[in-house]
Amino acid sequence: MHDKLLKRIATGSTEPEQLINTLTPSEFEILHLIGQGHSSQEIANLLCRSIKTIETHRFNIRTKLNLKDGADLIRYATRWVSENN
């Protein structure tokens, strides 16, 4: 999956997709889980992390990808996962 992302970045994709390479590995993993429909609590349980840590990652992802709110993050993540699977 990460290779697909790098190819899209290399070919000059749209802005949010170019910004995705600024995500840390943890943020990237969380973006993928959000795109699969998991809630923050489910992600925290799956990754054995606190809900606060997951919420911090979600905030950082939104900031790095210039997304307005949580709903934008869910839409973006869902679209990204469906396009890259």
Image (tube, helix red, strand yellow):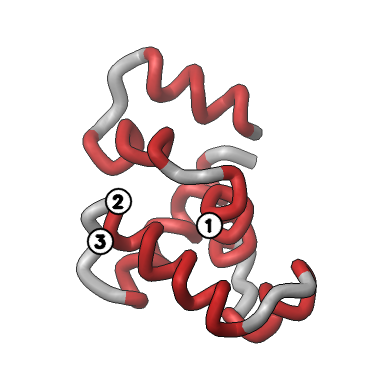
Q: Position of residue 69 (x, y in %)?
A: 27, 74
Mark 2 crowd level (few <14, some 14–19, many ≥20, 10 Å Cα): some
Mark 1 crowd level (few <14, some 14–19, many ≥20, 10 Å Cα): many
In this view, 53 is above or below 85:
below
Q: Which residue occupies the extreme top position in the image?
A: 11
Name the residue tied to disc 1: 31
Name the residue tied to disc 3: 67
Q: Position of residue 46 (x, y in %)?
A: 78, 72
Residue at x-position 51% and y-position 29%: 5
Name the residue tied to disc 2: 65
Q: What label does residue 54 carry, if any?
A: none
Q: Position of residue 73 (x, y in %)?
A: 37, 66
Label 1 secondary element: helix
Mark 3 crowd level (few <14, some 14–19, many ≥20, 10 Å Cα): some
Is residue 19 shown left or right of residue 47? left
Q: Position of residue 85 (x, y in %)?
A: 64, 41
Amino acid tagged 3 = Leu
Label 2 secondary element: loop
